[in-house]
Every structure is written in C-alpha cells, then in structure tokens.
Image (cartoon, rainbow, N blue to C red):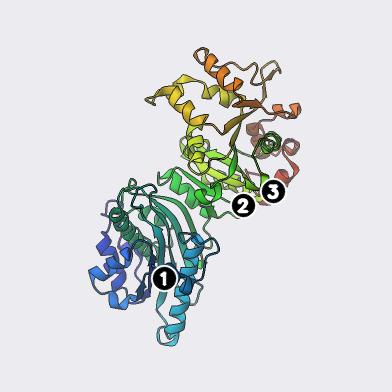
C-alpha cells in the first residue's frame, strides 16, 4: 500500500475531497471489508458506491435498522440502548469474524480486512434532542497481526436529520481513510477527521485507539488534542488511561469536582478531597453509590509559556490514574462554565471544592465583562439550585486563617457574596489539617528536581511511591 506522504506532501497541499478519499480506498486492491450502519441510513457506504470501483472494496453493506433484527444479529443489549459503545464493539467484532469465516484467507494473503460501523441517533422529529453516535473501524495493516480499532463518539450540531446524515457520511469516510493512510501518525488521525467538515457541524468528544499499530499510543494525549484543537470543550479518562464518554459517566450522578494542577497531588489536595467528600456525602439525597468524584484540570493549567508540555501532562495523568481517579480536562477557565457543563448531564447535587483565592477571583467583576448579562448571568449559571461550593481555607502572610467568614471580595460584590453565603451556597471545609496549609505544589516540584528528599513528607505515601516507581516530574 502506498505511503500517506504521497497524498499529503506539504502543509500547503489541498485537502482531498470526500470523493477522492473514497475512490482512493476503492482503488486500493488489498482493502476489503464490511459497512454496518444503524440509525442514520447507509450514509458512509454511499460515498464509496457513488465514486465507482466499489466491487473490490465492499464485501457487504447492511443496516440492521429494526431492533429485532439487530438483536438477532448482534445480541440483546441489557439496557435496551442501541446507541452505545458496547453495541458498536459488538458490530465490529461480529462483522470481521464473518469476513474471516466466509473469505478464504489462503487465497487472499494480502487482503487487509476491515469493518466500518456506526450506531447513530440523528435529531428527533420534535428537535428536543440533538443527534449523537458511536463510529468506529476495525482494520488490518499487517495480515499476520491482530486487528486495530479506532472508536470515536460524536455529537451533531446541525438542525436537520438530513444534514446530520451527510455529515456522518463525510466523517465515516475520513475515518476509514485515516485508518489506512495515517495510522502511523495518530495525532493526524484526529486532525483529518474534520477534513471537509466544520467544527460547528460536529463535535468529537471521545476517541480510543487500540491494536498493534497503536501499541505506543497514549489515548490521553489524543484526548488532549481534541480539547487543544477546539474539537470539544472537555474530555474525560478513567484510571485505566482510556477515554470515557462524559455524558455516560456523569449522567444522573451527584458530582463532586476538585480543580487543581495536581503537579503533583499533595497532602493539601488529599485533605481537600477527603473532607469535602465527607461533607458532600452528608448532604440530603446524596447516595454514595450515585456519586462520582472528578479531578478537573483546565487547559490553562496545562500550559507553560503558552505551550502545553505533553510530558508534564502525562506525568499528571499517570499519577491520577494510578490513584484510581477519574480526570476531566476542560477548556472551562471560568467556574460557571464548568457548572453549566455538569448541569447538562445531571439534575442531582453538584459540589465544587476550591481554595480561597479561587473564590475571591470568582467574585471579581473583571472576569465577566465579556458576558452581555455580566456577573449576574455568570452567577445564575454557577449557583443553580443544586450546586454548593466547599471552601478550603488558607493562611495569610501573617499565618492567620482565612475562610468564608473573613475573606475579602471586590467591594462591589460584598452584598452578592453575603447573599450566597447566607443561603448556604458557600460552606467552609471543616476538620482540615492546618499543618498542610503551608504545602505548595510548586515547592514540591522544585524539591523533586533538586533531589531534595524532604518532598516526600509533603505528599501522601501512595503518591510518593508512584512518583518514584513511574519516575514522574523529573524524579531520578
């Protein structure tokens, strides 16, 4: 198969059209597979039929649109939901297994089999819900190796089902083309998914690459690319390092979020986490089983001199994952945007734990001059009915404790601050360890790099252990 460099020789070269991509695939004699599409018509395979030469590429095109037929082919879903990652994975495996079973491999030693699949719900007739779906490909590059997979979740932004269907067709073609011609440059796979599309047409909020050709790929780096390139505003990954669909993780959950740099996690972070969680779980109607804790890092907190240090990001990601935490990377510099984001997925309790400095900044009018409704608009989004701020104290320059009772906000904001505090929207974290208030992560980081072993006593034992084990943050 020809190298992708043949088609992208320079940054100035024009992007291949969707037709050109589909034809290029069709003319590659060793690419052969199945298209299985549910919910939005056969929009991707249509691109390949229309350009000609499809007989050597398409083994089968199908749409098990009826639920009963779909269940008979791919199995019954326990939750009766069809637009899910689990459904997509079943489709991909089932169809590639069929190709292996029905096509004599001995007579097709060079054939690279694939299955492209999607399970999608376009915008409903009443337009109450925007469309979304799971899209993926299972494919071979080396016939002697296991299959590779690229799985993404996308949200449609257009207003009609027809527009969304056409967008899906372009997205699917981009995915197949990138799988075969850009597999060796994973970041470009992400970039080229938007070829011939605009970001106001579709949002990609989850991506996972697996298989032998992606064995050195860290999916967390790819998810960071999504946020960095404006493809989505927030991504999430779990303790195993794989990306998660935020909507699925946060749906109908009580959410406690801790924003920080976590560079590294110190005893202060641990103290904030444990004490705010205990307080949160004592709130009315907060069931521990229906509660999730999110460690959130903003894109702004990942930059160093205007650039994102990927090695530093991965160190933080590895550390939080090793501690079993779920991490959210967002482009929500303002807290009201984070609150608004959570409220998209749950109507249950939301808690945000923060330090005094962050709360003082929230009550600074200069951060809201870009809003037509100013600070009142922002606070309407931040302090909606089920949100509460858990305030972790700090020491002033004279080692005096500063909490919600004596912090100083902007003079024009005093009455507004009193209103929210009086109504229980701002509460102090109690039972904190005052000795921890003099621990600062930037000092810890400096000590690690200077081989000053006193840093260990400033971190939880498990964190120190993981930093040494994984050689994070410059530890040698």
Q: Residues within 10 Å of mark 2 (few under 14, many from 20)?
A: some
Q: Residues within 10 Å of mark 3 (few under 14, many from 20)?
A: some
Quadrant assignment, res 133 = bottom left
- In the picture, measured across the screen, residue 284 lies left or right of residue 419, that is right
Disc number lying in front (1 or 3):
1
Badge 1 or badge 2: first in the primary sequence: 1
**Residue picked out by circle 1:** 115
Q: Which secondary structure lies at badge 2? A: loop
- Location of residue 6 with respect to 231 vertically, above or below: below
- Location of residue 37 with respect to 157 vertically, above or below: below
Badge 1 or badge 3: first in the primary sequence: 1
**Residue picked out by circle 2:** 239
- Location of residue 300 with respect to 376 vertically, above or below: below
Q: Position of residue 250 (x, y in %)?
A: 55, 46
Instruction: Give whichever of 101, 279 is nearer the camera.
Output: 279
- Residue 466 marker: 3
Residue 200 seen by the camera: yes
Q: Which secondary structure lies at badge 1? A: strand
In the displayed orientation, state which residue is furthest to the left: 51
């Amino acid at each position: 198969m020809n190298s992708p460099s043949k088609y992208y020789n320079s940054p100035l070269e024009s992007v291949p059209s969707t037709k050109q991509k589909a034809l290029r695939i069709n003319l590659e004699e060793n690419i052969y597979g199945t298209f299985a599409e549910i919910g939005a018509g056969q929009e991707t395979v249509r691109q390949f039929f229309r350009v000609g030469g499809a007989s050597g590429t398409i083994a089968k095109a199908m749409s098990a649109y009826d639920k009963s037929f779909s269940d008979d082919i791919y199995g019954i879903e326990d939750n009766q939901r069809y637009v899910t990652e689990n459904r997509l994975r079943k489709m991909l495996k089932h169809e590639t297994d069929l190709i292996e079973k029905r096509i004599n491999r001995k007579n097709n030693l060079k054939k690279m089999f694939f299955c492209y699949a999607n399970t999608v719900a376009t915008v409903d007739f009443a337009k109450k819900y925007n469309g979304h779906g799971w899209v993926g490909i299972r494919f071979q590059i080396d016939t002697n190796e296991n299959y590779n997979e690229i799985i993404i979740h996308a949200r449609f932004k257009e207003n009609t089902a027809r527009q969304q269907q056409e967008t899906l067709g372009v997205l699917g073609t981009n995915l197949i083309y990138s799988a075969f011609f850009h597999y060796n440059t994973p970041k470009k796979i992400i970039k080229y998914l938007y070829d011939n599309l605009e970001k106001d047409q579709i949002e990609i909020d989850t991506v996972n690459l697996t298989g032998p050709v992606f064995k050195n790929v860290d999916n967390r780096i790819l998810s960071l690319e999504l946020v960095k390139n404006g493809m989505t505003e927030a991504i999430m990954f779990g303790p195993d390092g794989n990306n998660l669909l935020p909507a699925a993780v946060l749906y109908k959950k009580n959410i406690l979020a801790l924003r920080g740099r976590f560079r590294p996690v110190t005893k202060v972070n641990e103290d904030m986490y444990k004490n705010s969680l205990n307080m949160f779980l004592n709130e009315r109607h907060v069931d521990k089983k229906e509660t999730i804790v999110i460690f959130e890092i903003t894109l702004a907190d990942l930059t160093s001199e205007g650039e994102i240090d990927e090695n530093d990001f991965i160190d933080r990601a590895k550390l939080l994952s090793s501690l079993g935490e779920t991490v959210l990377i967002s482009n929500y510099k303002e807290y009201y945007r984070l609150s608004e984001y959570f409220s998209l997925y749950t109507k249950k309790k939301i808690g945000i734990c923060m330090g005094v400095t962050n709360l003082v900044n929230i009550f600074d009018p200069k951060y809201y001059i870009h809003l037509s409704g100013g600070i009142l608009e922002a606070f309407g989004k931040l302090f909606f009915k089920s949100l509460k701020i858990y305030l972790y104290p700090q020491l002033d320059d004279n080692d005096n404790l500063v909490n919600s009772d004596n912090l100083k906000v902007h003079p024009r904001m005093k009455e507004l601050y009193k209103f929210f505090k009086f109504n229980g929207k701002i509460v102090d974290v109690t039972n904190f360890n005052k000795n921890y208030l003099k621990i600062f992560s930037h000092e810890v980081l400096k000590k690690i790099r200077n081989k000053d072993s006193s840093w260990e006593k400033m971190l939880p034992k498990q964190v120190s252990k993981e930093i040494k084990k994984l050689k994070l943050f410059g530890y040698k």
